[in-house]
Amino acid sequence: EASESVAQLSKELVVKERELAVASAKADEVLREVTVKATEAEKVKAAVQKVKDKAQALVDDIAADKAVAEGKLETARPALEEAETALQTIKASDIATVRKL
Protein backbone atom coordinates (compact mmCIF):
# COMPACT_ATOMS: atom_id res chain seq x y z
CA GLU A 1 0.00 0.00 0.00
CA ALA A 2 2.90 2.35 0.65
CA SER A 3 4.20 1.82 -2.86
CA GLU A 4 0.77 2.64 -4.25
CA SER A 5 0.71 5.79 -2.17
CA VAL A 6 4.17 6.74 -3.40
CA ALA A 7 3.12 6.04 -6.99
CA GLN A 8 0.01 8.19 -6.55
CA LEU A 9 2.01 10.99 -4.98
CA SER A 10 4.55 10.76 -7.81
CA LYS A 11 1.76 11.14 -10.37
CA GLU A 12 0.36 14.12 -8.48
CA LEU A 13 3.85 15.59 -8.29
CA VAL A 14 4.27 15.32 -12.06
CA VAL A 15 0.91 17.02 -12.60
CA LYS A 16 1.75 19.76 -10.11
CA GLU A 17 5.18 20.27 -11.71
CA ARG A 18 3.50 20.71 -15.12
CA GLU A 19 1.01 23.16 -13.62
CA LEU A 20 3.87 24.99 -11.95
CA ALA A 21 5.80 25.15 -15.23
CA VAL A 22 2.75 26.57 -17.03
CA ALA A 23 2.13 29.10 -14.26
CA SER A 24 5.81 30.04 -14.24
CA ALA A 25 5.77 30.57 -18.02
CA LYS A 26 2.67 32.73 -17.72
CA ALA A 27 4.27 34.73 -14.92
CA ASP A 28 7.40 35.23 -17.03
CA GLU A 29 5.29 36.47 -19.95
CA VAL A 30 3.40 38.89 -17.71
CA LEU A 31 6.70 40.12 -16.29
CA ARG A 32 8.05 40.71 -19.81
CA GLU A 33 4.90 42.63 -20.75
CA VAL A 34 5.07 44.71 -17.60
CA THR A 35 8.73 45.47 -18.26
CA VAL A 36 7.95 46.60 -21.81
CA LYS A 37 5.07 48.76 -20.62
CA ALA A 38 7.22 50.26 -17.87
CA THR A 39 9.93 51.11 -20.39
CA GLU A 40 7.37 52.73 -22.69
CA ALA A 41 5.92 54.65 -19.75
CA GLU A 42 9.38 55.94 -18.83
CA LYS A 43 9.88 57.17 -22.39
CA VAL A 44 6.53 58.98 -22.32
CA LYS A 45 7.35 60.40 -18.91
CA ALA A 46 10.68 61.73 -20.19
CA ALA A 47 8.97 63.33 -23.20
CA VAL A 48 6.34 64.92 -20.98
CA GLN A 49 9.05 66.21 -18.66
CA LYS A 50 10.81 67.86 -21.62
CA VAL A 51 7.57 69.58 -22.64
CA LYS A 52 6.95 70.62 -19.04
CA ASP A 53 10.46 72.06 -18.77
CA LYS A 54 9.99 74.05 -21.99
CA ALA A 55 6.64 75.34 -20.77
CA GLN A 56 8.15 76.33 -17.44
CA ALA A 57 10.95 78.17 -19.23
CA LEU A 58 8.34 80.09 -21.23
CA VAL A 59 6.42 80.91 -18.07
CA ASP A 60 9.62 82.16 -16.45
CA ASP A 61 10.46 84.30 -19.50
CA ILE A 62 6.95 85.74 -19.55
CA ALA A 63 7.13 86.52 -15.84
CA ALA A 64 10.45 88.33 -16.34
CA ASP A 65 9.04 90.31 -19.30
CA LYS A 66 5.96 91.16 -17.25
CA ALA A 67 8.10 92.45 -14.39
CA VAL A 68 10.08 94.65 -16.80
CA ALA A 69 6.88 95.95 -18.41
CA GLU A 70 5.31 96.69 -15.04
CA GLY A 71 8.46 98.54 -13.99
CA LYS A 72 8.34 100.69 -17.12
CA LEU A 73 4.63 101.31 -16.57
CA GLU A 74 5.26 102.49 -13.03
CA THR A 75 8.04 104.75 -14.29
CA ALA A 76 5.71 106.26 -16.91
CA ARG A 77 2.66 106.54 -14.63
CA PRO A 78 3.56 109.98 -13.14
CA ALA A 79 3.99 111.47 -16.62
CA LEU A 80 0.65 109.97 -17.69
CA GLU A 81 -1.12 111.39 -14.65
CA GLU A 82 0.50 114.78 -15.26
CA ALA A 83 -0.65 114.71 -18.89
CA GLU A 84 -4.19 113.77 -17.86
CA THR A 85 -4.24 116.66 -15.40
CA ALA A 86 -2.97 119.03 -18.08
CA LEU A 87 -5.67 117.84 -20.51
CA GLN A 88 -8.34 118.63 -17.96
CA THR A 89 -7.20 122.27 -17.89
CA ILE A 90 -7.67 122.76 -21.65
CA LYS A 91 -10.80 124.77 -22.52
CA ALA A 92 -12.71 124.95 -25.78
CA SER A 93 -11.45 128.48 -26.29
CA ASP A 94 -7.84 127.19 -26.15
CA ILE A 95 -8.62 124.72 -28.93
CA ALA A 96 -10.22 127.47 -31.01
CA THR A 97 -7.11 129.60 -30.57
CA VAL A 98 -4.88 126.78 -31.76
CA ARG A 99 -7.10 126.24 -34.81
CA LYS A 100 -6.73 129.90 -35.79
CA LEU A 101 -2.96 129.47 -35.87
Image: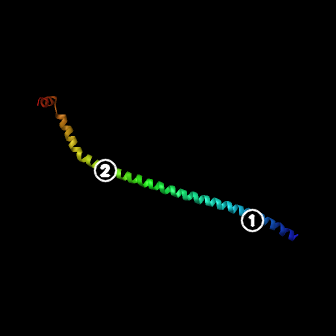
| Residue 42 % position (x, y) | 52, 58
Residue 81: x and y, percent? 22, 41
Q: Nearer the viewer, mark 2 or mark 1?
A: 1
Is residue 74 shown left or right of residue 17? left
Query: Observer-nearest residue: 67 or 65?
Result: 65
Residue at image location 32% in from the left, 50% down from the top:
65
Q: Of the numbered discs in the image, which one, if any, rests on residue 58?
A: none
Residue receiving disc 2: 67
Residue at image location 48% in from the left, 55% down from the top:
47
The residue type indicated by label 1 comes to Glu
- Residue drawn 35% across and 52% down? 61
Mark 2 near mark 1, Cβ–Cβ under 8 Å? no
Secondary structure category for the residue under label 2: helix
Report which quarter residue 94 is drawn in.
top left
Is the N terminus in the top left, top right, bottom left or bottom right quadrant?
bottom right
Residue 17: mark: 1
At 44% from the left and 53% from the top, the residue drawn is 51
- Between the C-alphas of marks 2 and 1, the distance is 72 Å
Q: Residues within 10 Å of mark 2 (few under 14, many from 20)?
A: few
User: Is 19 on the left or on the right of 8, as rendered?
Assistant: left
* Image x and y of residue 3, in percent: 86, 71
x, y percentage for residue 90?
Answer: 16, 33
The residue at the far bottom in this view is: 3
Q: Quadrant of residue 85?
A: top left
Residue type at tag 2: Ala
Label 1 residue SS: helix
